[in-house]
Amino acid sequence: MRAHHLCSALGLSTDKSKVEGFRSKLKRLVERGWLVESEPGLFAPRDTDPAGSGAPEQGERAGQHRRAGVASGSRP
């Protein structure tokens, strides 16, 4: 789908500036492996792997980057 169509399907604003901001977010999802861009401006979900692991690997597992003994949302 195109960014404009995704915005309208999700109930977001279809103003040109808002669509361009959303398009940049879609491009970041392509870089991270969550989406594919088959043609310029045409976005689709990537094919899931047969193992069904969900999110693409990013080198670190979620939670490993946190400091030990510090709960999320707490301040030092």
Image: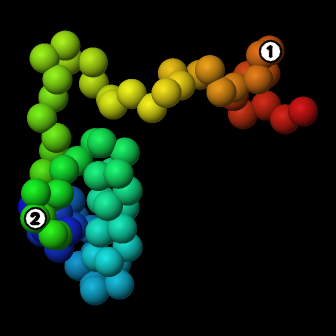
Task: Give above or below for 47 relative to 44.
Answer: above
Give left or right: position of 3 versus 56: left
75 or 43: nearer the eye?
Answer: 43
Please name the residue shown 37% across and 45% down the image: 32
SS class, disc 2: strand
Provide residue 36's location: percent of width, then percent of height: 19, 50
Badge 2 crowding class, 10 Å Cα cut-off, few under 14, some 14 to 19, many 20 or more, is: few
The image quadrant of residue 67 is: top right
Q: Amino acid at mark 1?
A: Gly
Quadrant containing the C terminus is top right
Provide residue 33's location: percent of width, then percent of height: 30, 42
Which mark is first along the chain, 2 or 1? 2
Q: Residue 36: which disc?
A: none
Looking at the picture, the colour scheme in use is rainbow
Question: Is residue 24 in view?
Answer: yes
The image quadrant of residue 10 is: bottom left
Please name the residue shown 38% across and 56% down the image: 28
Quadrant containing the N terminus is bottom left
Task: Give above or below for 6 relative to 64.
Answer: below
Residue marked by disc 2 = 39
Question: Is residue 9 in view?
Answer: no
Provide residue 61's location: percent of width, then percent of height: 51, 21
SS class, disc 1: loop
Q: Amino acid at mark 2?
A: Glu
Residue marked by disc 1 = 69
Provide residue 50's location: percent of width, then percent of height: 13, 17
Give left or right: position of 50 versus 17: left
